Amino acid sequence: MTNQYPYIPRSEMRHLSRALPFWMSLGLIPLAWFCAFFGGWTIALLPLVTWFLFSLLDAVLGLNLDNADLEATDDDLYWYRLVTLIWVPAQFLTVFGLIWYVPQADHLGLFERVALFFGVGVITGTIGINYSHELMHQKNRLERFLADVLLAMVLYSHFRSEHLLVHHRYVATPRDPVTARYNEGFHRFYPRVLRQSFHSAFKAEADMLARKNLPWHNFGNPFWKYWGLQTGFLALALLLGGWAGVLLFLVQAGVAIWQLELVNYIEHYGLTRKHLGGGKYEHVKPHHSWNAAHKASNWLLINLQRHSDHHYKPDRRFPVLQNYDADEAPQLPFGYPVMTMAAMVPPLWRRIMNPRVRQWRRTYYPEISDWGEYNARQTPMPR
């Protein structure tokens, strides 16, 4: 069969065809504009597609247990990387374009305007923050800057410092704010993590400067960049949409943060690294993260659900993250879209997850008989 696109080498066509499912997230951008133009019942489409359509696709398409070639080069991964780069200007134009358009759209009532930006927050949180997570782990300075841009658009810039300097170091220990404790419902977890993650991120950056004999307010502290970008985006929202634009911007930012912390909540719920004494813990292992091999939600979330491998190799690009079998790492019964919805109902969440945590404890740490006493002896996160 002849190549229908002779200007693209056959090997590139193969890479492109494999990458295309991960491009489905870009379809949410025109959907957001469609909802804004037509209003009414269409406003519900953004959360419905993001949460329920991909949950349905997971049920239909099942699991993907295949692993990509670890020897793949950045050239081989070009079409995968491109979607994360394209998303940044697409999100920027959508968020601020809608902030300009919506306040003057007479066909949209107050409820429709707020509901629309709720939906925008669903995609800036589900896709935008997730793509920033991919970009912040790369060594390329442009990609890391784009990660900062995405986070500033949801007023959560400190997530980069917290994630890179705190979470990856202290995951599955009491010193990590975003590791959800066993039996800790999301509604208790959420206000705790909002407070503690900012504190831990700022302290981690200040401590790094102190080791160089520099004060926290030195301009080497990335918080100056975080605050500058966030202030700039708030000012742009005010310029384009007035105070109504600022309020709509805050709505989408708040929803995006909620979406992020829902994912943080389920990724390590109830999992604990073994304490070795003296404030030290065992190395992070595959069984310290919950995983999900569901095909469609991994397309949407660029393999975030292969979470154990991400903690093993944090700078490994998403197409080559490896899947772990159930005998190597704990598996969620459903993909993240379903699990995040379950997390909003604590009794349902505990019914689904607590038996799995107890089985995990019996499997990996049979020598620990009293987990209440064991956890009470751990080193808490500094206040």
Image (spheres, helix red, strand yellow):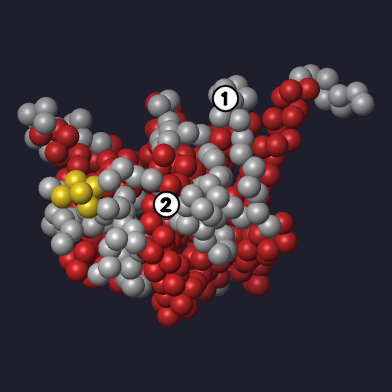
Q: Amino acid at mark 1?
A: Glu
* In the image: residue 305, left or right of residue 374: right
Q: Quadrant of residue 109?
A: bottom right
Front of the two marks 1 and 2: 2
Mark 1 residue element: loop
Q: Quadrant of residue 372?
A: bottom left
Q: For the view shown, which residue lies furthest in the right direction?
A: 1
* In the image: residue 129, left or right of residue 22: left
Mark 2 residue element: helix
Say which label, 1 or 2, has the lower sequence index. 1
Can the viewer see residue 336 in this picture?
A: no
Can the viewer see residue 263 in this picture?
A: yes
| Residue position for label 2 | 287
Q: Are marks 1 and 2 in contact (CB under 8 Å)?
A: no
* In the image: residue 326, left or right of residue 62: left
Q: Amino acid at mark 2?
A: His
The answer to which of 132 and 211 lies nearer the viewer is 211
The answer to which of 263 and 28 lies nearer the viewer is 263
**Residue at the (22%, 52%) spot, across then down:** 275
**Residue at the (11%, 31%) spot, across then down:** 211
| Residue position for label 1 | 71
**Residue at the (24%, 41%) spot, across then down:** 223
Q: Quadrant of the C terminus?
A: bottom left
Per the model, the C-alpha gap separating discs 1 and 2 is: 25 Å
Figure check: 312 above or below 277: above
Dot 2 crowding, Cα within 10 Å, few <14, some 14–19, many 20+ = many
The answer to which of 263 and 360 lies nearer the viewer is 360
Q: Position of residue 368 (x, y in %)?
A: 28, 63
* In the image: residue 257, left or right of residue 176: right
**Residue at the (19%, 46%) spot, across then down:** 280
Q: Quadrant of the N terminus?
A: top right
Q: Position of residue 292 (x, y in %)?
A: 55, 55
